Amino acid sequence: MASVVGLLEERELAARERVEELREVADRVLAELAEAETAWHE
């Protein structure tokens, strides 16, 4: 049987990976928004 600490560490790792994925998505969205705003103001 897995230990509670081991299970928590697995969940923490999964959460950290998800946070990194979401940060990458947010960066892409912000870049696209900046590009769209620049095009709109031209």
Image: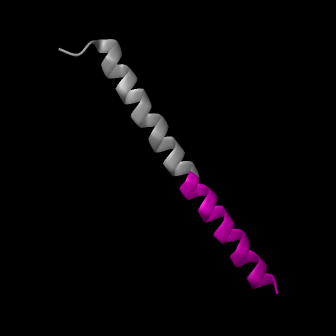
- Tell me if residue 17 comes above or below residue 10 in the rendering: below
Query: In screen coordinates, is 1 left or right of 20?
Result: left
Classify residue 33 by image quadrant: bottom right
The answer to if 36 sits in the magenta stretch is yes
- Picture coordinates of residue 26, whole percent (x, y): 59, 56
The answer to if 4 sits in the magenta stretch is no
- Tell me if residue 39 comes above or below residue 2 in the rendering: below
- Tell me if residue 30 comes above or below residue 37 in the rendering: above
User: Does the magenta stretch mainly form a helix, a strand or a loop?
Assistant: helix
- Picture coordinates of residue 4, whole percent (x, y): 29, 13
Question: Which image quarter is the C terminus in?
Answer: bottom right
Question: Which image quarter is the N terminus in?
Answer: top left
Query: In screen coordinates, is 38 left or right of 20?
Result: right
- Tell me if residue 37 comes above or below residue 20 in the rendering: below
Closer-to-camera residue (37/13): 13
Closer-to-camera residue (1/35): 1
State which region is magenta.
24-42
Residue at 50% across / 49% down in the picture? 21
- Picture coordinates of residue 23, whole percent (x, y): 57, 49
